Image (cartoon, rainbow, N blue to C red):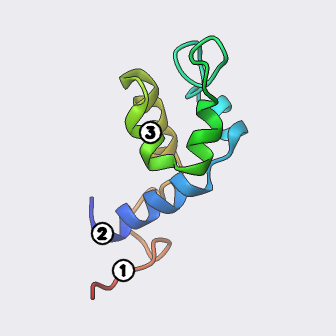
């Protein structure tokens, strides 16, 4: 993964909403439902996706990763903007 692809992955992560998480299989009985936790995990994800992703069970994290990757462009084309480093 290069810097541009990583940047794009972060943008995808920040753009996900509740329906994306449900349709991507990230929300299940182990994460994101009232049965899974007394706290609102989906709302926590929408507020701070990185922190909440790190708290997810491995299987849910794997599905989140697959969801983000499915939205990445297929190739390293001009679809991914270049990232300059300071």
Disc 3 marks which residue? Answer: 53
**Horizontal and vertical percent for residue 49?**
51, 47
Q: CA distance from mark 1 to mark 2?
A: 7 Å
Q: Residue at 47% of width from left, 30% of height from top?
A: 63
Above-or-below relation of 54 to 71: above
Q: Residue at 28% of width from left, 84% of height from top?
A: 85
Disc 1 marks which residue? Answer: 83
Q: Earlier in the sequence, mark 3 or mark 1?
A: 3
Count neighbours of disc 3 (C-alpha within 10 A) and say few if under 14, some if 14 to 19, many if 20 or more: some
Which residue reaches farthest front? 38
Disc 2 marks which residue? Answer: 3
Q: Residue at 37% of width from left, 63% of height from top?
A: 5
**Horizontal and vertical percent for residue 64?**
48, 36
Q: Which numbered marker is on residue 68?
A: none
Q: Residue at 67% of width from left, 31% of height from top?
A: 23
**Horizontal and vertical percent for residue 18?**
70, 39
The reply, left or right, for residue 63 in relation to residue 3 is: right
**Quadrant in the picture for residue 22:** top right
Q: Earlier in the sequence, mark 2 or mark 3?
A: 2
**Horizontal and vertical percent for residue 3?**
30, 69
Which residue reaches farthest right? 19
**Quadrant in the picture for residue 10:** bottom left
Above-or-below relation of 4 to 52: below
Q: CA distance from mark 2 to mark 3?
A: 20 Å
Q: Quadrant of the N terminus?
A: bottom left
Q: Nearer the viewer, residue 71 or 52?
A: 52
């Amino acid at each position: 993964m290069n810097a541009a692809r990583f940047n794009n992955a972060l943008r995808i992560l920040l753009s996900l909403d509740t329906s994306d998480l449900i349709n991507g299989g990230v929300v299940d009985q182990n994460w994101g439902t009232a049965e899974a936790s007394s706290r609102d995990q989906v709302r926590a994800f929408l507020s701070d996706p990185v922190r909440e992703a790190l708290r997810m069970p491995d299987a849910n994290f794997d599905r989140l990763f697959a969801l983000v990757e499915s939205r990445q462009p297929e190739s390293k084309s001009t679809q991914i903007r270049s990232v300059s480093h300071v």
